[in-house]
Structure formats: C-alpha cells, structure tokens
Amino acid sequence: MQADPPRAEPTAVGSRTTAGVVVIGNEVLSAKVADANGPQILNSLANLGVRVGELAVVADDVDRIASVVADFSRRFSFVITTGGVGPTHDDCTWKAVSQAFAAPMVFRAELAEQLREFVGADLTPEQQRLAHLPLDAQIVPVIGRWPLFRMRNVYVLPGVPALVAKNLKQIEILCREQGVCGPTLATAYFTVDEWLAVAHIDAVVAAHSDVEIGSYPVFDAPDYRLRLTFEHLDAQRVQAAVDAIVQAIGIAQWVRTQWGRSP
C-alpha cells in the first residue's frame, strides 16, 4: 500500500516541519551496543531541514515506549522509532505502537510473503511474529528487501543500521515529494574568543530574536576561535543577522561565512 507523505506543518516563513526520534533498546542504555541509528537519523533530518524537537532513548518496556510514541505523535509533525521490531522476546515496539494508537494487532499475509522472500524459506512460528502489525499500518516498499513501516505519522524502523539507512532514504523521498523545505543556514567564523564577544552576541540575538543563533567556542582550529550559526526560513533574515554580527564583532576578526551545511 502506498503511504501518504508525513504529516507536516506548513512550510511558510516562521514555521518548520518537526520530528521526534525514539531509539529503543536495553542494549543501548546499558552500553552493550553503541547507538549508530540516532546520529544517522538526526543527520538525515538535518539535511532535510526538519527540526528535531526531542530524541528519547527508551528501554524495552511496552508501556514506556507507547507513552513516548503517543506523546511525540501529538507534539511533532512525524516520529521515527528505531529498534525493537525483531521476533525475539525483547522486541516489543510494534506492541507499544499498537497500544499508543489503541489499534489491534493483525496478521498481514502480504508482509509474511515478503518476509519469506527475505529469509529464503518458509517462516517458522517465531518468525511469523514479524508479520503482525497494528491495524491500518502501512507498508512502503524500499530499495532492498526490508520495507518501511508507517503507523499514522510514526515511522517504525529496524535496529540494524544498514536497514535504517535504506528506510531513511525512502523517508527523505516522501518528505521531498511533499515539499518539506528547510531553513537557510549560515555559519560565521571569527578569530575572537567567545567570552570576549558575549556582549556583541547578546545584542545581535536580542535584535534578531526570530533567527535561531548558536554560539560555539573552538579550541583546535588553526584559523578561528568562534563559530556562530544562523538559521531561519527567510534567507534575508539570516543575511541581516550575519551582517549585524560581523559589524558588531568587527570585520578584522571575521574569517569567513559559509552558507549551507558542511559536506
């Protein structure tokens, strides 16, 4: 079944599509497994221009996962979960999503067939657990053998990083088809130390309060000591804020301004 694009906020000036991210697994919280999925999800969403409002790392607890998913679904344009969708005892994400939306779990014959092709043999009773989804959950084909799953505005991704990467590519396609657009980003670099520029930064932040401004001291770069970022959907507002900070700190301390994200 073809999935609808993610529910998104209007992309007019002053508004941005938002997302919540849920990383699921006791193994992450106990440091048995280093989380590779959270960073790649954040990077993918940043490249799309989606503002991530919150990232939660949650244990394999049905009630807790359900609570976070329901909360994020209400607060953000869409949600991405990763982990907990296998056939073993600690894979409880689908049960939690089912609970979050009060939707019964049902057997999906078409998914069972895809899984049979995935494993190359008939499914065991244990493997057939993977073919149960909440009622109305959507299955979106992706390049490769593992599909993308969506329940309302929640995308449910596996925990294997390579499969997550393929699912993220499909989410990116869906977002771009809907016209999700990100803000203009500029990064200005200065030779001055941050603590010497605080008054100037505060003044520009106050004068350009609608622009999201970030200040980051740098200690290991050969040519700059301060990095300032500026984000807004209106490029002219970003330009005005950048011009203001360069004038305030001084052109002699300005190194360069980079537009867009680093490669």
Image (cartoon, rainbow, N blue to C red):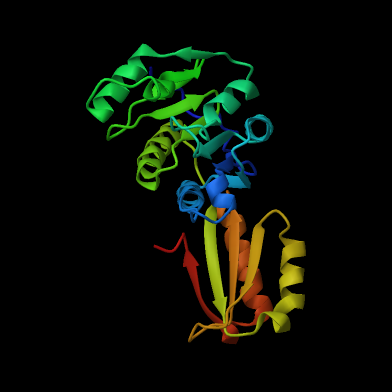
* Percent of width and height locating residue 189: 55, 76
- Locate residue 126 relative to residue 252 in the image: left or right: left
Question: What residue do we see at 62% from left, 56% from top?
Answer: 237
Q: Is residue 135 visible?
A: no
Q: Quadrant of the N terminus?
A: top left
From what the image shows, is residue 81 above or below residue 3? below
Question: What residue do we see at 53% from left, 35% from top?
Answer: 90
Question: What residue do we see at 55% from left, 56% from top?
Answer: 31
* Percent of width and height locating residue 71: 69, 33
- Locate residue 255 relative to residue 120 in the image: left or right: right
Number of marks in the image? Answer: 0
- Locate residue 190 relative to residue 137 in the image: left or right: right
Q: Which of 10 and 150 lies nearest the eye of the viewer?
A: 150
Q: Quadrant of the C terminus?
A: bottom left
Q: For residue 77, which quarter of the picture?
A: top right
* Percent of width and height locating residue 207: 75, 63
* Percent of width and height locating residue 155: 50, 32
